[in-house]
Amino acid sequence: MAEHANQSPTDVVDFLVSQHQQIKGLFDQTLSASGKKREQSFIQLRQLLAVHETVEEEIVHPRAKRKIANAGAVVDERLHEEHEAKSVLKRLEKLEVDSDEFTRQLAELRGAVLDHAKHEEHDEFSKLGQELSSDELENMGRAAKLAEAIAPTRPHPGVESQVANLLAGPFAAMLDRARDAIVGKG
């Protein structure tokens, strides 16, 4: 078992936990803002969530299923939560950012996403940190950063498996980035 004390910046667990902190901050920033600032914060949040979940679905969940005993049910539950979050994000994209409904749904999503992150860190990430060598964790971290660079920037409910991400990911990412550039919100 790997000792997880000397972590490097490329360690996949550190990378993803850091993103969880950024996501929490963006939720708080979006909920406390209004108007154009709220819209801009939400776009950043939506992009980070889309990229983060793609990285987990392509890199982390498949490895967890192979390396952690009885991880199948844990990963399946996380994938279900990710699908639900993507569905809510899709609905939020259609709402006016200063509406009461947007605020209500975003606050509910915040609670669900933070709970999801807590479960990932406890049930998946910490166990990967125990089971994998520091070299394996760093290799996964490098793979995560590469996946992040080409991941879709918008939620795509129904694309929660490694295979679905690999098939739809590059095309979806290209379309998302084109949409972001066209509307000037990327």
Image: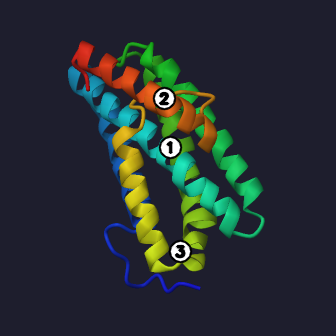
Q: Circle 2 is placed at which residue position?
A: 155
Q: Circle 3 is placed at which residue position?
A: 129
Mark 3 nearby-residue class (10 Å; few <14, some 14–19, many ≥20): many
Mark closest to the chain's N terminus, 1 or 2: 1
Q: How far apart, in angstroms, are the residues tagged by discs 3 and 1?
A: 19 Å
Q: How far apart, in angstroms, are the residues tagged by discs 2 and 3?
A: 28 Å
Instruction: Determine whether the residue tagged by mark 2 lies in a helix, strand or loop.
Output: loop
Instruction: Determine whether the residue tagged by mark 3 lies in a helix, strand or loop.
Output: helix
- Number of residue marks: 3
Q: Are marks 3 and 1 in contact (CB under 8 Å)?
A: no
Q: Quadrant of residue 14?
A: bottom left
Mark closest to the chain's N terminus, 2 or 3: 3
Q: Quadrant of residue 9?
A: bottom left
Amino acid type, label 3: Gly
Seen in the picture, residue 154 relative to 141 is either above or below; the reply is above
Question: Residue sitting at 53 percent across and 29 percent down?
Answer: 168
Foreground pick, 174 / 102 = 174
- Across and down, in percent, residue 69 comes to 75, 70
Mark 2 nearby-residue class (10 Å; few <14, some 14–19, many ≥20): many
Question: Residue sitting at 49 percent across and 27 percent down?
Answer: 89
Q: Circle 1 is placed at which residue position?
A: 53
Seen in the picture, residue 9 relative to 5 is either above or below; the reply is above
Amino acid type, label 2: Pro
Foreground pick, 91 / 178 = 178
Q: Are marks 1 and 2 in contact (CB under 8 Å)?
A: yes
